[in-house]
Amino acid sequence: GQNIDQPTEMTATEGAIVQINCTYQTSGFNGLFWYQQHAGEAPTFLSYNVLDGLEEKGRFSSFLSRSKGYSYLLLKELQMKDSASYLCAVMDSNYQLIWGAGTKLIIKP
Amino acid sequence: GAVVSQHPSWVICKSGTSVKIECRSLDFQATTMFWYRQFPKQSLMLMATSNEGSKATYEQGVEKDKFLINHASLTLSTLTVTSAHPEDSSFYICSARDPTSGGEQETQYFGPGTRLLVL
């Protein structure tokens, strides 16, 4: 079966760095997405990785290793507004998005 | 970036009534739109894939006669929850792909969601 694993919850301190991991087992691979979802709101797109390596976008970076079925989202200089759920999703060979359950990130002052 | 709108943002209705939710792509044409449902503290659950000009593809376990989807134009898809019951109360979110967004053409952009409460 297809499976996306990410931690349920993480806590970090304002100003620090946090890494949210995602491992996946899917039938085929056509890219991995990270989305941010604040409580009560719809997800917003953060990043897309289809090739191995690190993609950097400001304070957020996303890494992919296809051979390991592994990705991480790195958040630097954490701000209180970064408190949200972070969803990892993989597009399989049928171009269907397989969603992880999300990681709730709690930022403490 | 691509903008997707949804209307209404909130709906409260009586059990047995039907509710229509609209999803629009505002600055691009979306041949494919997706409808999701999300219960509190749970991940997104794909309900159906809506293709312009053809029938929607429903996920297993989703009743197509209860959740009617119409994708009549390249910028509009509608989801109608027929004969709604309290267990249909949920957060309904649509998304759309922007086929013109280069290497990220598979990226889905989400509408703001519609919160449905059935009494």
Image (cartoon, coloured by chain):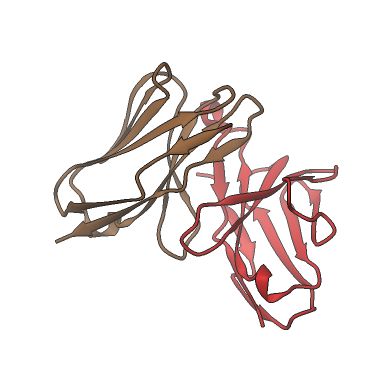
Chain colours: A brown, B red
Residue A109 % position (x, y): 14, 61
| The N terminus of chain A: image quadrant | top right
Give me the residue at 55% from left, 62% from top. Answer: B39
* Residue at the top extreme, as displayed: A67
Give me the residue at 19% from left, 51% from top. Answer: A12
Of residues B60 and B75, the one nearer the viewer is: B60
Residue A49 % position (x, y): 43, 27
Residue B1 % position (x, y): 50, 44
Give me the residue at 59% from left, 24% from top. Answer: A27
Number of numbered callouts drawn: 0
B60 relative to B25 in the view: left or right: right
Q: In the figure, residue A14 lies in which quadrant? A: bottom left
Residue B54 % position (x, y): 85, 42
* Residue at the front extreme, as displayed: A1
